[in-house]
Amino acid sequence: MTCQTYSFFVLSVVMICFGRFGNSLILAQLQNDIDQLKADFNSSNSDVADGGPIFTEKLINWTERNEKRIILSQIVSMYLEMLENTDKSKAHVRHISEELYTLKNSLPDGLKKMKDLMDLAKLQMSDLKIQRKAVNELFSVLQKLMETSTSLKRKRRCRC
């Protein structure tokens, strides 16, 4: 996959994942709009390939549907933030933004979930007070984990 197709690939994954591609006309129009956006950003520059992809590589590690929805909601938000600073008088920018807003509205609040993960990463597990709180919550956490594990086993056995 070339660097020029990354943005289209990510947008395609997002839209397919959330069922937005009812017909290939939307896909074809978006491809055209993204090609115009690439020209606006001069994305054929050789430096685009430096360091590899910024989004598509991250998607590899997120395999479950709900997991993907979390990371994709973050990616959609980042694209919308990027497009906020572009010329909205251009039809292709408006069209891409509209599609992304539609997708964003269909996603769960991934920002809250990402914040929760970042808050967990910041916890100082060497702090005695944090350790005490963690020990007090250990049984509840294990219960949730067991419920989740049991639920997954049932889903795997069910051949509905």
Image (tube, grey):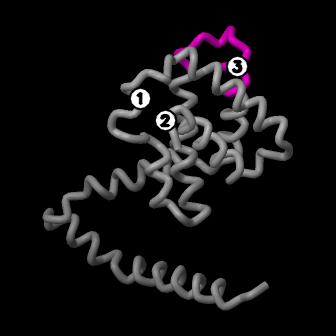
Labels 2 and 1: the sequence-earlier one? 2
- Left or right: where 118 falls relative to 43: left
Identified by mark 3, the residue type is His
Q: Return the disc, 3 or 1, that comes first in the chain's sequence.
A: 1
Asked if labels 1 and 2 touch by Cβ distance under 8 angstroms, the answer is yes
- Which residue does the image show at 53% across and 80% down from the upper left? 148
Q: Which residue is at the front of the view, 4 or 93?
A: 4
Q: Is residue 57 visible?
A: yes
Q: Nearer the viewer, mark 3 or mark 2?
A: 2
Amino acid type at circle 1 is Val
Residues packed near mark 3 inside 10 Å, few (<14), some (14 to 19) or many (20 plus): some
The correct choice, above or below, for 29 with respect to 58 in the image is: above
Residue occupied by mark 2: 3
Q: Secondary structure at mark 2?
A: helix
Task: Residue type at mark 2: give it.
Answer: Cys
Q: Which residue is mark 3?
A: 92
Q: Which residues are drawn in magenta?
A: 84-97
Relative image position of residue 90 (x, y in whole percent): 69, 11
Q: Say if the magenta span includes residue 77.
A: no
Sequence-earlier tag: 3 or 2: 2
**Camera-nearest residue between 71 and 151:** 71
| Residue sitting at x 64%, y 19% | 36
What residue is disc 1 on?
48
Q: CA distance from mark 2 to mark 1?
A: 7 Å
Q: CA distance from mark 3 to mark 1?
A: 21 Å
Q: Distance from label 3 to label 2 (Cα)?
A: 20 Å
